[in-house]
Image (cartoon, rainbow, N blue to C red):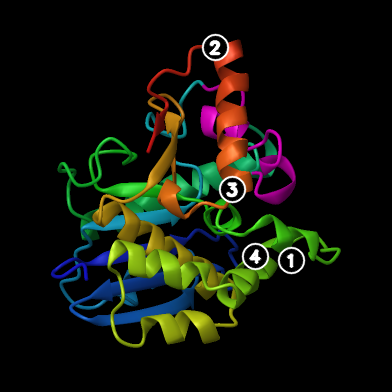
Amino acid sequence: MLRGKALLGVDVGFSKSRASTGIAWYASGRFEAVAVKSDKEARLACLPSRFCADVAALDGPLVPQGIEGSLDGPRYAERFLSRGAFQHRCKPGFSHFGTGLELRKASHIAASQVRNVVKENGRLATPFCAGTHSIVEAFPNAFLGVLLDEGVYAKSPKLKRGQKFDWLYESAIENGVLERVMSHVGFCPPGLLAAVQREQHHEKRAAYVCLITAACVAAKKLTSIGDKDGGWIVLPPLALWADWSKNALDESERALTAETSARNRIAR
């Protein structure tokens, strides 16, 4: 159990008209997941009084130098997870143009909004945090995707745009992989697993996966892919990955090493 730790998971939504932000928090044995609008007041109002997270995980691109950074192409983590088997199972969108860039901007706004309810960096989250506070980047599709066995994907239905995450979430529940992660990192407060299993709301589901991502960081049991320029995406501990995703990780690493030095760019 992560005793004494407070955690925050944020699914960054940037709709101006609907409650598209999912927020899940945990502190002192209590937890909640809600969907709110994207303004700062709405996002902070759902948190308990005096809440201060040891780690926050946001589902959105977080580039260390901020949205004004000079990246002129996909980030290292984005390229890494767009190769081989990753490409069809948990590929991220590129964040240097179009909707991806808009999400990147929204992610940095969200990070600035919650910064004051997140502890400053310590040895806990370094070097994966995006700035001066313990805020890390989550990617729920890949977090769930790397845990599922090959046979699960063989039974995947034809999915329309926007349906992939919910299929991954439901497959993760059905196959017990989220329960396995929570047990592995010692994040099993009473009632949380049952709440995760029965949740039907898209944004709340994503927020729960972000919360579990934060727990991985707090427990120092994680895999993180990226570099100091483009930022890091936090994924589950490698010991829990499916065989296909471990193989895909090695293949992606070799391919990118052939293009450019990738030394110290994968932390396990």
Within the magenta stretch, is there residue 72? yes
Q: Earlier in the sequence, mark 2 or mark 3?
A: 3
The nearer-to-camera label among 1 and 2 is 2
Does the residue at mark 2 contact the one at mark 4 (Cβ under 8 Å)? no
| 152 to the left or right of 105 | right
Q: Residue furthest right?
A: 158
Residue 120 coordinates in the image, percent (x, y):
17, 47
Structural crowding at the residue carrying mark 1, measured as other residues with C-alpha within 10 Å and reported as few (<14), some (14–19) or many (≥20): few
Q: Nearer the viewer, residue 116 or 91?
A: 91
Q: Which residues are magenta?
A: 71-91
Asked whether the viewer can see residue 109, the reply is no
Element type at mark 3: helix
Residue located 64% across and 36% down the image? 94
Q: Which residue is mark 2?
A: 260
Q: Which residue is mark 1?
A: 163
Q: Which residue is mark 3?
A: 243
Residue located 58% across and 21% down the image? 254
Q: Amino acid at mark 2?
A: Thr
Residue 102 coordinates in the image, percent (x, y):
59, 44
Element type at mark 4: helix
| 161 to the left or right of 252 | right
Q: Earlier in the sequence, mark 1 or mark 2?
A: 1
Residue 190 coordinates in the image, percent (x, y):
30, 86
Q: Amino acid at mark 3?
A: Asp
Structural crowding at the residue carrying mark 2, measured as other residues with C-alpha within 10 Å and reported as few (<14), some (14–19) or many (≥20): few
Q: Which residue is mark 4?
A: 168
Q: Amino acid at mark 4?
A: Leu
| 36 versus 112 height, above or below | below
Q: Earlier in the sequence, mark 3 or mark 1?
A: 1
Residue located 31% across and 41% down the image? 129
